Every structure is written in structure tokens, then in C-alpha cells.
Image (tube, rainbow, N blue to C red):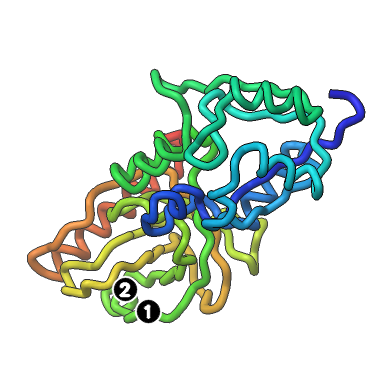
Amino acid sequence: MRGLVPAALTFVPHPRSVVHGVKEIPYLMQLEERTRRIRELGVAEVRVQRFDAALAALTAREFFERLGEELPLRHLVVGKDFRIGRGREAGVAELRLLGAELGWSMEDVPAVWVEGAPVSSTRIREALAGEGNVELAARLLTRPFELSGTVVEGFGRGRTIGVPTANVRLPDEILVPRNGVYFCSATAALQPERDLYGVLNIGIRPTFDSGTRSVELHILDWSGDLYGETLRVRFLRRLREERKFESVDVLVRQIARDIVEARSLISGQHQPL
């Protein structure tokens, strides 16, 4: 609508974690990344609203009256299934009436459907955490799923078996795909213009009886120190499940096969999305 400044409102933490008293629902991206991507869509202002029990207790009218004091509202855009207010009292029909009273118009947008089902953050989480299906997640997101983390010192086992890895520490609140081995691309903060490729393992390294979940990336054709650097990792394909091997030698042979497969994917036999 002409003359209006587009703005977006996002909640932290996830409202369901507060309303239903469950542990915090993992995010698909960090808040900084979320706001950056929203702004790239042409949204001039992104407002981050802390969601707590007091906010959850507000009626829809109370919420929008309070919001109007801080952010003048003229036109509201929501999804068809959007609901807000204490006890999820107000959906599209109720909000249309409320807007007429409070002086703003309303528009509800239909869901986007991909492969026979609507796109949603829940569906993306299930594809990633439940199945490790990073290719489906990429189709739903229209881009590969990404994680950013800091390279920290690990156990050093990869180097001892001839397959050095970068141990990536991720923020606790970010969703991590299902345990397994993945073909990934990455960029490092020290060389953001260079595309790196590698084989990434998420899991507990059962052959070594580790028990501690880690994210470790073996970067192909790389030598150098990455400790302390930020890596942005893009998941392109799931290669296999993580499993316990009968010996370290058998594990090394499997890793060699994983690397061969990764190189074949780099050469163009597989196109993500």
C-alpha cells in the first residue's frame, strides 16, 4: 500500500515454548540472520518482541492497542492460520473486525505449497531434525539450510587418522540436523569469497565411544588453522547414517568413500535444489 512503511514483528522466544511450557523450540536461524533476511525482502523495520507470560495473557485487543502506542499500524498482513491473543482467541475473522474498530485494514495470505503440503517452520524442522532430509529442507526454504559456528579445539582424532576436521561449536538455540554424514559447502570469515566443500559428521562418534554430540567438518583440499574462525556451513546432501564401525581402519575406509562421493557431487553430478 502506498505511503506505508513495511515493518515486521518477530517474537523471542518461540511463543509455543512459553504458552505450553515446553523446552525452547530450536530456531532455524539466529536472530541476527533472521532480521537480516527479513530486511533483504524490503522490510524497513524489524521489531523484536520479547514473548513472556505477561504478553501471552493479553487479549488480542490489548496486544494491538499496546503495539499501536509504539508502532503505528495501518495495515496488518498475516497468514490464514494466524491466531493471537489469550487462549488463541483471535483469528483472521476476529482480527478483521478488530482492525475496523482500531483503524487498520487487514490482509491474509495463503500458504505456499510444496510437494503436496504447505511450507511451515514445523515441516522444515521435521525434515532436518527428524529425517536429516536436507534436500527437502532446501526446497522448502528455496536455499540450502545453513548453520554458523565457531571453530574450536576438539579431541584431535581426525588428524591422527589422516582426516583432519574443524570442530564447529554452534549456538545452543539453533536446530541441528539429524545425526549423520553430509556433503556440505562452507565459507570461512577469513576468506568469505572462497567456496569450500567438505564432508560433515554430526553425532557422537560411536566408533570412539565418545558419547558427546559434535559437528565436525572435513574440508577438502584445505590446509591451515581455522581455530577461532566463524564457519558458515550449507547442507547440500545427506550421505549416510552415522554408525559404529568394527575398527578405526574400517571407519577410515568408509570416510575415504564419503570423500570420493563428495568429490563426485562437486563435479556436477548432483545439483542442490
Element assignment for label 1: loop
Residue under the point 76% across and 40% down:
7
Alpha carbons under labels 2 and 1: distance apart: 9 Å
Compared across the picture, whether 70 is left or right of 138 comes to right
* Residues at circles 2 and 1 in contact by the CB criterion of under 8 Å: yes
Q: Quadrant of the N terminus?
A: top right
Residue under the point 39% across and 42% down:
134
Q: Tell me residue 8's x, y (percent).
A: 71, 41
- Report the disc number at residue 158: 2
Residue under the point 34% across and 77% down:
159
Residue 83 to residue 35: above or below: above
The residue closer to the viewer here, 116 or 166, is 116
Residue 4 to residue 260: above or below: above
Residue type at tag 2: Gly
Residue 50 to residue 213: above or below: above
Compared across the picture, whether 146 is left or right of 243 comes to right
- Report the disc number at residue 154: 1
